[in-house]
Image: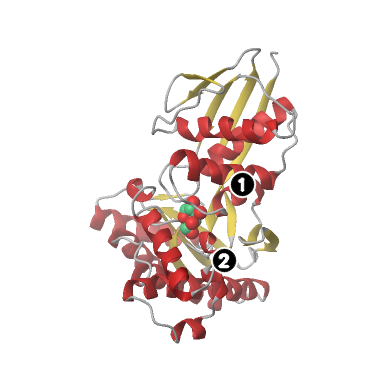
Amino acid sequence: MNETFVQRAYGRVNLIGEHTDYNGGWVLPTAIAQFTEVTLKQRNDKKVILHSSRQREYTYELGQEVPSHDWTDYLKGATKLLHKFTQEKAERFNGFEATIESTIPEGSGLSSSAALEVSFMKAIRLAYHLNVSDVELALIGQRIENEFVGAHVGIMDQMACSLATFHTAVFLDTKNLTYEQIELPYDQMDLLVINSGISHQLFAKGGYNERRAQCEEASKLLGIKLLRDISLPELATKKLPDILMKRARHVVSENERVHLAVKAIKNKDLNSLGQLFIDSHHSMRDDYEVSIPEIDFLVELTLAQSDTFGARLTGGGFGGSIVAITKKGKALEVANSILPLYEKQTKKKATILS
Ligand code: GLA
């Protein structure tokens, strides 16, 4: 009973393929160095005792999970849905005491919540020998967000936190959940992730869910199941209300960019990859309207550096982080030249994450 079980999940940065996952499309995330780690000790009763830097102690009973609209919902949702899942296989788990430590900044668009769900469920799986795969854990993670937290997110973050590694990006088909690990050309490039210091607080229940509903509406009017099922030339021949056309155009063009990005990575063609990042940013800014002026400014500053191939908003938007690729060995130099300018203009503190 005194044995401890430790599990970690890394945050993710999505290289390209934004707001495509809930449209059955393609994404390309990779792991970042920041992580969440859960240390768990089993108990003989149904009590779950949580310790974290966010809250010294929080207790609840298995089977009594009720949302409280704070960070504990990700964990209560996890035990509730994991219980449902394992029960069907005649497996069970008892209560436990868990200590949670995280270095992923919240609201930064780098999957702090998915890393929390995944590391927590992996620790329960390890302690109680549960027969649940990494992909099943990711699917349960998405259900926690959809059914317990009320954020209608896609599957990218949980799959990335479950599967992504440092030197590869996961080229994931979010409809079929098939994926390929793509080697990143780190012999020729650096990856740079900068957190704008503006948290995407209103994201979950506001703009994000609205975008998702608009995509569903657009698909319905187009007579297709998912926006993944239409090409850009085909979309151009259709009639949709202006706003829905803009949303659909982002998703459909972004899917195309993911495929082109994979090709560019395989060919080590960093100029083309950089241009795809830039096009993706413009599409998120103008058609999907999920960027904010501070993020646009950060992207512009990064692109103005001659060692930058490309830069864009990453994650859901409305704040969060940017991702850029620079020439090999130049990421820090680029970041150090732009951060003072960003901070002077916006009065926000940006941080380098990768
Ligand atoms: C958030 C969601 C993901 C995905 C991205 C946007 O991170 O959790 O499912 O939709 O936004 O690409």
Q: Nearer the viewer, residue 150 or 135?
A: 150
Q: Quadrant of the N terminus?
A: top right
- Mark 2 residue type: Gly
Name the one closer to the observer, 317 or 64. Answer: 64
Position in image of residue 181 (x %, y %):
70, 60
Which one is earlier in the sequence, the residue at label 1 or at label 2?
2
Question: Compared with residue 336, is residue 257 higher up or lower down, i.e. above or below?
Answer: below
Q: Are marks 1 and 2 in contact (CB under 8 Å)?
A: no
Q: Quadrant of residue 194?
A: bottom left
Q: Residue at x 70, y 34 (%)?
A: 88
Q: Residue at x 54, y 60 (%)?
A: 21
Q: Residue at x 65, y 29 (%)?
A: 124
Q: Residue at x 51, y 66 (%)?
A: 326
Q: CA distance from mark 1 to mark 2?
A: 16 Å
Q: Position of residue 162 (x, y in %)?
A: 64, 46
According to the picture, the residue beneath numbered tag 2 turns out to be: 25
Tally the numbered discs: 2
Toward the viewer: 282 or 325? 282
Element type where label 2 sits in the image: loop
Residue 116 place in picture, x, y as percent: 54, 37
Classify mark 2: residues with Cα within 10 Å, few (<14), some (14-19) or many (20+).
many
Disc number placed over residue 139 in the picture, else none? 1
Decide if ligand 1 comes within 8 Å of the CB at mark 2: no
Report whether 292 appears left or right of 47.
Answer: left
Q: Amino acid at mark 1?
A: Leu
**Residue 98 can be seen in this image:** yes
